[in-house]
Image: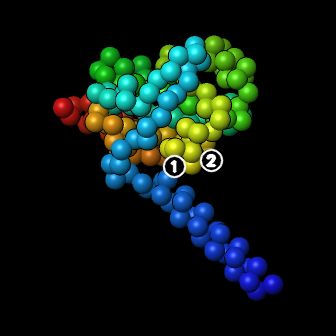
Amino acid sequence: MRIKHGAIALALVAVASVGAWVAWGTGGSAAPVSTFVLLDGTNLRTADLRGKVVLVNFWATSCTTCVAEMPDLVATHQKYQAQGFETLAVAMHYDPPSYVVNFVESRKLPFKVAIDNTGAVAKAWGDVKLTPTTYIVNKQGNILKSYVGPPNFDELHRLIEKLLAQG
């Protein structure tokens, strides 16, 4: 029995370490090479986003926090898009595509939305399991900040403005 509890404790430490990496892994590592399948059926590659400041948000229609933060993501996108800012919302693999399409259409989301049908994109981006998880990628294609849960939008806006001002 003692070994079993020890193994469980070790597993919990491993999970906590991964969670900490996702929450604090903001050292400027390169964004994973990924291909996003957009709702219109086209593909968008990570390389296509170079030269822009990008917010990549992993979300689900069943996630109440994701739904609650969506108006703030829309407002952020609208505030900065003319300055070279891009928003990409990635629906999780377990989200039924019809729910995602209905959500996007009913709320008239103004940014690109992808569906991660296989879960491969979430896996590549740090094995995302918790939603919302949001990454901020600079113009050079490096992840500079990540958030698990809703970001502080005032802080996020200051970061976006700083990154947009950089060459």
Crowd class of label 1 (few under 14; some 14 to 19; many from 20; radius 10 Å): some
Res 161 visible: no
Mark 2 element type: loop
| Residue type at the position of mark 2 | Lys
Q: Quadrant of residue 144?
A: top left
Kindly identify which numbered label has been placed on residue 129.
Answer: 2
Res 141 visible: yes
| Residue type at the position of mark 1 | Gly
Q: Quadrant of the N terminus?
A: bottom right
The image shows residue 29 at horizontal and vertical percentages of 35, 48
Closest to the camera, between mark 1 and mark 2, is: 1
Which residue is painted at 61% across and 32% down in the image?
A: 116
The image shows residue 81 at horizontal and vertical percentages of 36, 20
Q: Quadrant of the C terminus?
A: top left
> Badges 1 and 2: C-beta atoms under 8 Å apart?
no
Which residue is painted at 73% across and 20% down in the image?
A: 98
The image shows residue 96 at horizontal and vertical percentages of 73, 27
Q: Nearer the viewer, residue 9 or 103?
A: 9
Colour mapping used in the image: rainbow
Residue labelled with disc 1: 126
Mark 1 element type: loop
